[in-house]
Amino acid sequence: MGIRKIFTIIWQINTHIRISRFLYYKIPFIGKYISLFIDRFLLIIYGIELMSFSINVKKLSITHPSGVLLGGNGIYSSGRVVMMAGVKLGGRSPKDKEFLLKHKEKKVFEFGDNVVIGTNSVVLGPITICDNVIIGSMSLVNKSITEPGIYVGVPVKKVSDVANEDWVSHL
C-alpha cells in the first residue's frame, strides 16, 4: 500500500467503517459507544451520515462524501458500489412489514456488483439493485431494479442496456 493511498478520502472512510464495525461487533458494551463516536466523527469531518454497523459492502467508494446519508437501515453488497455526493438512502415507511424484516437482517438496501449511484440521487428501500446498474444524477429509485443498464429520472426509467465498469474499475 502506498503512502498516498492513506491520504485518499475513500481509504479513510472505508478504514473508519471497518474499525467502527469491529468495535461494534467485537467489544461488548463500550465498543458500541466508541463506534457511535467514530460515526459522528465521520459526519463532522466529511459530512457523511452513517451507522457503520449496518454497512456490509465488499468494495465501497464514496467519491465526494459531502451530504451523503446512508443511515442505519442496512446496506449489503458482495460487489463494488460507488456513491456520489449527496446520495440519500431512506425507507419508504417505518411500519412496512418488508422494511422491518429487512431492517432486522441489515439488508434494506441490497446492491449487486458494479452499481453506481449518481449525485443527489435518492434510493427508498427496501430495495434490491442487480449487477451492472448505473443510476443517473438526481434520480429517484423507489422500486427494485432487476435488469442491468442505465437508469435516470423521477422515478427512474431505463434509458440504456449498456452499463460499463468505468466507475468501479479503481476498486
Image: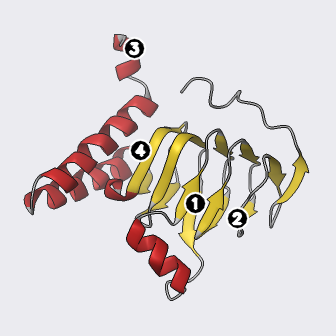
Residue at disc 2, secondary structure: loop
Residue at disc 3, secondary structure: helix
Specify whether 15 is left or right of 146: left
Q: Nearer the viewer, mark 1 or mark 2?
A: 2
Tell me where residue 84 sits by quadrant.
top right
Name the residue at 52% across, 77% down: 99
Examine the rendered structure and indicate whether residue 158 appears above or below residue 126.
Answer: above
Q: Label 4, on which residue?
A: 46
Question: Camera-side residue: 3 or 130?
Answer: 130
**CB-based contact (under 8 Å), mark 4 and mark 1:** no
Q: Label 3, on which residue?
A: 4
Please report whichever mark, 4 or 3, sits nearer to the chain's N-terminal start. Answer: 3
- Residue 124: numbered disc: none
Name the residue at 48% across, 57% down: 75
How crowded is the residue under tag 3: few (<14 C-alpha within 10 Å), some, or many (20+)?
Answer: few
Please report whichever mark, 4 or 2, sits nearer to the chain's N-terminal start. Answer: 4
Name the residue at 55% across, 86% down: 96
Query: Marks 1/2: CA distance?
Result: 16 Å
Q: Nearer the viewer, mark 4 or mark 2?
A: 2
- Residue 144: numbered disc: 2
Residue at disc 4, secondary structure: helix
Query: Marks 4/3: CA distance?
Result: 19 Å
Question: Camera-side residue: 28 or 135?
Answer: 28
Specify whether 117 is left or right of 31: right
Extreme-top residue of the structure = 2
Q: Label 1, on which residue?
A: 88
Name the residue at 82% across, 54% down: 152
Examine the rendered structure and indicate whether residue 97 appears above or below residue 116.
Answer: below
